[in-house]
Image (cartoon, rainbow, N blue to C red):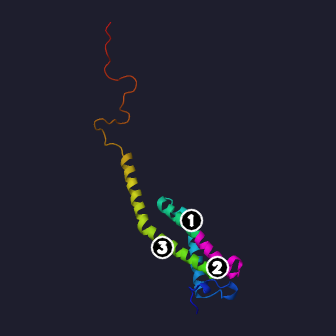
């Protein structure tokens, strides 16, 4: 087997190379499963995560990155499979490029879930506690607080003043 990272191997015309092999099968499976999962989360997450808006927004951001990456990776494999050699679209270098992009994307997702997302969850919880504290009614009947319906309305109901004539 030749060196899979040599420039000659990566840029060999598609008509002179084999299309199917262990790397290409793994590539197609990886990108097809990735695209399927991204599309599944795109359509299913809003139904299941109505109550957790932060997680829903995070998944939707990730899906909007993953769908184009996986789609373009499969598109360039289709160019190779159909042996389209216009502008070098069927060269292996494109498959390696999108495999690298997909690995970097997954590494970024891993970093985001491990480092950034927990901070966002903590900030959201702190904001919820702050809002709950602000909306909490004052303790009942202390000085300076009025109970609903205790204010004066119209005529007073107590003693009437005597009129001096």
| Residue 150 vs residue 65, the one in the foreground | 65
Q: What predominant SS class does the magenta segment belong to? A: helix
In front of the other: 1 or 28: 1
Q: Earlier in the sequence, mark 3 or mark 2?
A: 2
Q: Secondary structure at mark 2?
A: helix
- Describe residue 140's horizontal placement relative to residue 64 as left or right: left
Residue 78 falls left or right of residue 104: right
Quadrant position of the C terminus in the picture: top left
Mark 2 is surrounded, within 10 Å at the Cα level, by few (under 14), some (14 to 19) or many (20 or more) other residues, namely many
Q: Nearer the viewer, mark 1 or mark 2?
A: 2
* Magenta extent: 68-90
Q: What percent of the width, then of the height, locates residue 52?
A: 47, 60
Q: CA distance from mark 1 to mark 3?
A: 16 Å
Q: Which mark is residue 77?
A: 2
Q: Residues within 10 Å of mark 3 (few under 14, many from 20)?
A: few
| Quadrant of the frame with the N terminus | bottom right
Q: Position of residue 20 (x, y in %)?
A: 64, 87
Q: Residue at x 64, y 77 (%)?
A: 76
Q: Are marks 1 and 2 in contact (CB under 8 Å)?
A: no
Q: Crowding at label 1, few (<14), some or many (≥20) Cα neighbours within 10 Å?
A: few
Q: Earlier in the sequence, mark 1 or mark 3?
A: 1
**Corner quadrant of residue 126:** bottom left
Q: How many marks?
A: 3
Q: Nearer the viewer, mark 1 or mark 3?
A: 3
From the image, tell me which residue sits under label 1: 64
Query: What label sits on residue 54 in the rendered view?
Result: none
Rendered residue at 41%/67% (across/down): 115
Residue 107 badge: 3
């Amino acid at each position: 087997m030749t060196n899979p990272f040599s420039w000659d191997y990566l840029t060999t015309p598609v008509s002179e190379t084999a299309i199917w092999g262990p790397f290409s099968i793994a590539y197609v499976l990886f990108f097809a499963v990735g695209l399927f999962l991204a599309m599944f989360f795109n359509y299913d997450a809003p139904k299941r995560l109505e109550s957790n808006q932060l997680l829903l927004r995070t998944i939707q951001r990730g899906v909007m990155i993953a769908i184009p990456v996986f789609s373009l990776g499969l598109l360039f494999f289709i160019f190779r499979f159909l042996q389209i050699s216009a502008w070098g679209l069927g060269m292996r270098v494109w498959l390696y490029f999108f495999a690298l992009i997909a690995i970097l994307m997954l590494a970024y997702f891993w970093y985001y879930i491990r480092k950034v997302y927990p901070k966002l969850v903590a900030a959201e919880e702190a904001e919820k506690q702050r809002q709950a504290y602000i909306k909490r009614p004052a303790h009942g009947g202390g000085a300076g607080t009025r109970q609903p319906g205790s204010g004066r309305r119209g005529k007073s109901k107590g003693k009437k003043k005597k009129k001096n004539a």
